Amino acid sequence: MRKHFLRAGALVVSLAALLGWLAYTRFDFFVPRLASEEGVVVDRLLRVHFFLIAAIFALVVGFAVYSVWAFRRRADDDTPGAAIHGHGGLEFLWTVIPLGIVLSLSAMGVRDFLFLRRTDADLTVQVQAQQFSWGFVYPEYDIRSPELVVPTGQRVKFELTSLDVIHSFWVVEFRIKEDAVPGMTTYAYVTPRTEGEYRVRCAELCGSGHANMYAPVRVVSPEAFDAWVAEQQAAQQQAASPVARGEQIFQQYCAACHTLDGSPKVGPSLNGLAGRTTTLDDGTTVTVDEAYIRESILDPQAKIVAGYPPVMPATFGQALSEDDLDALVQFLLQAGE
Amino acid sequence: MRHVLTTGLVRGLVGQAVGFALGVYTARAWGATDWRADGPLAWAAVLSVLGFMLASGMVSDWLGWLAGNFAPPRHGAPPGKPRWWRYWSVDYDHKVIGIQYGVTALVLVGLAGSVALIFRSELSKPGIDFLEPAVFNTLIGWHGIVMIAGILTGVAAMANYLVPLMVGARDMAFPRLNAFAYWINVPGVVLVVLALFLRWETGWTGYPPLGVQTMPGAIPFYLGVFVIGFSSILGAVNILATAFGMRAQGMTLFRMPIFVWSMVATSIIALTATQLIGLSFVLVVLERVFGMTFFSPTLTESAQALGSPPGQPLLFQHLFWFYSHPAVYVFILPGLGIISELLPVFARKPLFGYKWVAMASLAIALVGFLVWGHHMFTSGMSDIMRVTMMWTTLLVAVPTGVKFFNWLGTMWGGKLTFPTPMLFVLGALSIFLIGGLSGPPNGTVSTDLFLHDTYWIVGHFHATMFGGFVYPYIAAIYYWYPKVTGRMYNETLGKIHFWLMTPAFWTMSLGQMLAGLWGMRRRIVDYDPALGVAGLQTAVTIAAHVIFLSMLIFAFNLVWSAFRGKVAAANPWRSRSPEFQVPSPVPDENYPAPVVVVSEPYEYGGPEPYVVFAHGPAAADD
């Protein structure tokens, strides 16, 4: 038995060394690009996890594979296996050692979680989720934007709300994720560290447009951020043309489900809408005019285009101001003409 | 054909259709214009279940009791019916019910697996190729819930067939309740099938407010799951009563076969937690039908008319996961019991640390009740709850580890042989290992903020389900196949099945986990090519098809061998378990005489058998 233990032990140690080395040194292969200080903390513990997985995997598989090979029944051997019933000391050890490991992991988890969730922040961004779009409000600067722009090195507090169903705010490169729940405000904290372009991706199934519920993210230098803020504030002073404003609203609220190039997505394409004759699911036809477009935005279930599911949210009346709605309708009336 | 029409199944389905039609008709008469509206649909669904219950014969004996007719529980087909009739009708023999459960489980798992191939093919490359998003969302929810129903019936199959045999009893404690618990699944599954056609978009978790707003398929989905839940609760009562009250003479608790221990632990969970998912789903139905706002913060017109306060979406998640987390232990504990049961047979030596393995099952079951919040680490739940649930969650790893180490101890120094059941046991061990080891990163709250709702989770739970249920269930089917049918399965086909399925599963599982780490979210019909996961998705899709192919070989083997297989000996595995000491297939009433336990269950090489049959008159209390 001593011989077997030594051999199996050697197998376990070499397997653990190989896998542990891979998990530890090739860590970057396993995780995506990192763009936040909080992500550094997440990745650090994830690396510990990977190392433990490699070690315990090697331990179990090493002994199992060795047993399969060394203790296979030889031909014509009809004797029973060794009459071992158990071993109190071993049971004690393999209860107490794993207990120590998981308690340590929990302690590290608490340490990291408290660090991630500490409430100091340099900048507040209100994230407003709805089917199937994101909006970002910067209360300190009185800016509303379809794009999330954040400066490096500043801890951003995200205040998450939802107009309709549960969504989840996630930027892969930031690592951190938090649900946006209707009826309450939830919080996430991120300190961007790497400039670049990323995406907010909804991580909680929220309906037909869930897969494409994206918003663009730009991490910029503090100077570039200040410039962006000034630019946005100036732009909001001077009213843009309704059509240009409408296009921006389309990109933010509609593009997850509708295209402008004639190809269907979750809903019908919206190019060349004005004057088009459309067949509805009850077989009737309707000619598209301003009143029809307006009705379809505010009360989407009133008329359903044949061949499409009745899944468009009815929350746009809440989300869009009267001016925004006018601008969107103006944009759609001329889109793809 | 005449006989087919008189089976309980066919009569029940007709009764269900009649009940549904009656519901639609009365709703119309009361002024409903569209039967797919929430109210009429829920009403028709409820009537359809009652219709099935009355027409199938599953409550006939109880109704007879009301009329003063106390017939003994019926075994076998009535006079004038062929032998197969009993398998398609209400029968009170636990072995028949076990086979009914077992075949139902294979059918449900097969259906849910086929559906998975459809959406897996959609995901093999980026872009929306052939599935409308609403259909995709419906299919993933359907895959999930039908797999769960399939797993629950598979667990019940093993429990029903094996527990009475293993404790040396003639039948379950409550045979009529046993039949009821099986048959109630059928109308529930029919409702879930209806949901597929009416569509709903929440996935199997049914979270409101989306669950309140989505398409009408949500109604039969919620009600179907509610109905299926009765099966778990009532089945658990029966298992506990049988395991504690009907053991053979001399079978102390620590001389029970280890599988019975795992079913005791499982049944404690199923008996006490299943109500919570039923409750949460019924509350959503009430919210949809009557506007009784429990979960939606924005009020519908009817809710405003009732003066309801706003609902709380997180309340649903607490109720739902209070069952649905322990439920995964309902799925895996029986499977782990099968591993513990089969390893000693194929190692020809005692189960290492029997008492520790038995107590580990109970520990998993009890700790499992305190960990539900890890499904809500990103839900907006309070930070203190998240931290608490992390401590409890990681504790589950300790008893699970104890099981693994005892399995290694059982193999150590054995005389191992590797027929198909043993291969699947070893496969289960390896897959459950990676399923278990991928748990702590998501159980630790800080790293879960990254991993939550990604494909890492998809990989993690498919590995736990395959390692904890699918592989052990397949091992159990191969192992007890000769006992059930009296014939041997084809060993070559069994080995082909294993060697196709296992590398494919490993590919699928690792591919899913890696895609998740790279940023692939769960439950999306389309993904961003920039993540670089397209190659992984293609590999996972191919692997899934290979798994399906191997399951077809499995199905062929089961059907073909039932007719053409070699006639099996009474004890092909030289097992000490009582069911292998009687002929194959097991005779009606199981044992020729009362079973007496005279030594330990896994004492391979020991001088005494585990059980003997008492000769002479039956004991007075039998």
Image (spheres, grey):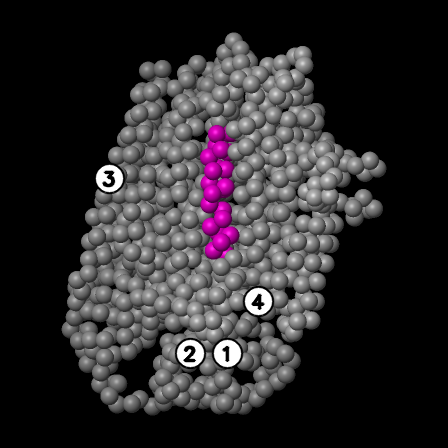
Q: Residues within 10 Å of mark 1 (few under 14, many from 20)?
A: some
Q: CA distance from mark 1 to mark 4?
A: 19 Å
Residues behind callouts 3 and 4 on a single chain: no
Residues behind callouts 2 and 1 on a single chain: yes
Question: Measuring 27% from the left and 67% from the top, which residue is drawn there?
Answer: A159
Q: CA distance from mark 3 to mark 2?
A: 48 Å
Q: Which mark is residue A316?
A: 2
Quarter of the figure with the C terminus of chain B? top right
- Mark closer to the observer (3, 4): 4
The amino acid marked with disc number 4 is: Asp
Residue A7 pos. (x, y %): 34, 21
Q: Nearer the viewer, residue A100 or A200?
A: A100
Residues behind callouts 2 and 4 on a single chain: no
Question: Measuring 66% from the left and 25% from the top, which residue is drawn there?
Answer: B590
Q: Residues within 10 Å of mark 2 (few under 14, many from 20)?
A: some
Q: Residues within 10 Å of mark 4 (few under 14, many from 20)?
A: many
Q: Is residue B462 left or right of residue B15?
A: left
- Residue B428 visible in the snapshot: no
Numbered circles on residues, count: 4
| Residue receiving disc 4 | B38
| Residue receiving disc 1 | A300
Residue B263 pos. (x, y %): 50, 34
Which residues fall within the magenta stretch? Answer: B259-281
Question: Measuring 52% from the left and 20% from the top, which residue is drawn there?
Answer: B251
Q: CA distance from mark 3 to mark 1?
A: 53 Å
Residue B117 pos. (x, y %): 55, 53
Q: CA distance from mark 2 to mark 4?
A: 24 Å
Question: Measuring 35% from the left and 49% from the top, which residue is drawn there?
Answer: B374
Q: Are marks 2 and 1 in contact (CB under 8 Å)?
A: yes
Q: Is residue B492 left or right of residue B65?
A: left
Q: CA distance from mark 3 to mark 4?
A: 50 Å
Q: Are marks 3 and 1 in contact (CB under 8 Å)?
A: no
